[in-house]
Image (cartoon, rainbow, N blue to C red):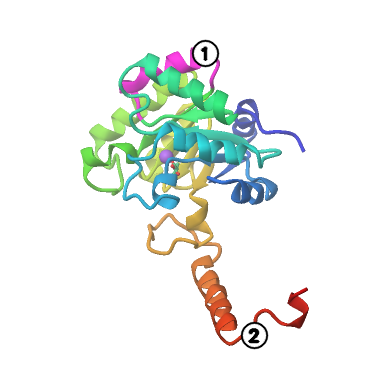
């Protein structure tokens, strides 16, 4: 099949075809996600929580993101691979941001980078784009600035924050970003933003008026079970299925049911 590019996503928006996006952090998962037909694979810094067990996304390093991204890139035939720039690798200055983005592109083979924030990182975004690296924006709930807000609750419910988000989205479009993620904001605001820009807006907890949806794959297949926000639809309960399967294995080993005669040489 034809590879998805940043151009295909903009075309999908203009024909009204919704964009599907999921995370993946490793080869085996990325093979399944790509093979199932997901348009965009995000190597999210949520790997900090999901893969490494940290409480926030702040601790994950650029080297660790490159390791995850290179594993994902080796698995894919069709999906566009977007890689998060982790906390601390782009906020100081545009040159550092570009250096970090270049390392991701060269060392992982990913196709684009994602950065959290609006006008405060405008110069960094422009510098990265000038080097020919596609950039996806990320507004609304931005987990790398969790300590500024203190909670993971819905963002931009107040008009002042909503207006700032509208301006930031326009800025990201004007700067040349190929898409924007909107996380956990009111559906009406997300719809309004999606209609106000020509680039695709991909939502997570941002309602049905946007151009595509993204979820963390471990959440939607129910491998995690303690994270239960309203926006999360679980398609499987792998936590339960895996616990049962592994429990059965333990029982079979103990009872000497496994291995049986056919399962040995
Ligand atoms: O890291 C991540 O998984 C993300 C998505 C939730 C958008 O940034
Ligand atoms: Na992220």
* Residue 19 position within the rendered picture, expressed as x and y whole percent measured from the top left: 59, 40
Instruction: Tell me, for residue 131, which label it has, or none.
Output: 1
Asked if residue 195 can be seen in this view, the reply is yes
Which one is nearer the viewer's eye here, 108 or 211?
A: 108
Q: Residue at x 58, y 80 (%)?
A: 253
Q: Report the number of numbered marks.
A: 2
The answer to if 124 sits in the magenta stretch is yes
Residue occupied by mark 2: 257
Asked whether mark 2 and ligand 1 are closer than 8 Å, the reply comes as no
Front in this rendered view, residue 36 or 184 = 36
State the quadrant of the C terminus. Answer: bottom right
Q: Earlier in the sequence, mark 1 or mark 2?
A: 1
**Image point 39% across, 35% down: which residue?**
61
Relative to the observer, which residue lies in front, 3 or 185? Answer: 3
Stretch of the chain drawn in magenta: 117-133
| Vertical comparison of 128 with 76: above or below | above
Height in image: 128 above or below 179? above
Query: In this view, which residue lies farthest toward the front?
Result: 265
Q: Quadrant of residue 145?
A: top left
| x and y percentages locating residue 6 in the rendered image | 60, 27
Q: Secondary structure at mark 2?
A: loop
Does 114 lie within the magenta span? no
Question: Residue 208: image x %, image y %?
Answer: 49, 47
Residue at left 50%, top 34%? 66
């Amino acid at each position: 099949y034809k590879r998805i590019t940043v151009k295909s996503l903009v075309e999908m928006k203009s024909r009204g075809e919704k964009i599907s996006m999921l995370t993946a952090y490793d080869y085996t998962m990325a093979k399944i996600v790509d093979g199932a037909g997901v348009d965009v694979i995000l190597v999210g810094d949520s790997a900090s929580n999901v893969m490494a067990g940290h409480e926030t996304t702040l601790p994950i390093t650029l080297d660790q993101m490159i390791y995850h991204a290179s594993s994902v890139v080796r698995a894919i035939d069709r999906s566009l691979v977007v890689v998060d720039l982790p906390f601390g690798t782009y906020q100081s200055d545009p040159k550092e941001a570009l250096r970090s983005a270049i390392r991701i592109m060269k060392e992982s083979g990913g196709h684009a980078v994602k950065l959290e924030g609006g006008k405060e990182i405008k110069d960094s975004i422009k510098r990265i784009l000038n080097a020919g690296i596609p950039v996806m924006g990320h507004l609304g709930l931005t987990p790398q600035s969790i300590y500024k807000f203190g909670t993971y609750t819905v963002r931009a419910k107040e008009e002042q924050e909503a207006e700032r988000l509208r301006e930031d989205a326009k800025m990201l479009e004007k700067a040349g970003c190929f898409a924007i993620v909107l996380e956990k904001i009111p559906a009406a605001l997300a719809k309004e933003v999606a209609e106000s820009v020509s680039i695709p807006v991909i939502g997570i907890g941002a309602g049905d008026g946007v151009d595509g949806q993204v979820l963390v794959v471990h959440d939607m297949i129910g491998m995690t079970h303690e994270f239960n926000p309203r926006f999360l639809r679980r398609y499987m309960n792998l936590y339960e299925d895996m616990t049962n399967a592994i429990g059965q294995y333990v029982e079979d080993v103990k009872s000497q049911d496994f291995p049986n005669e056919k399962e040995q040489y």
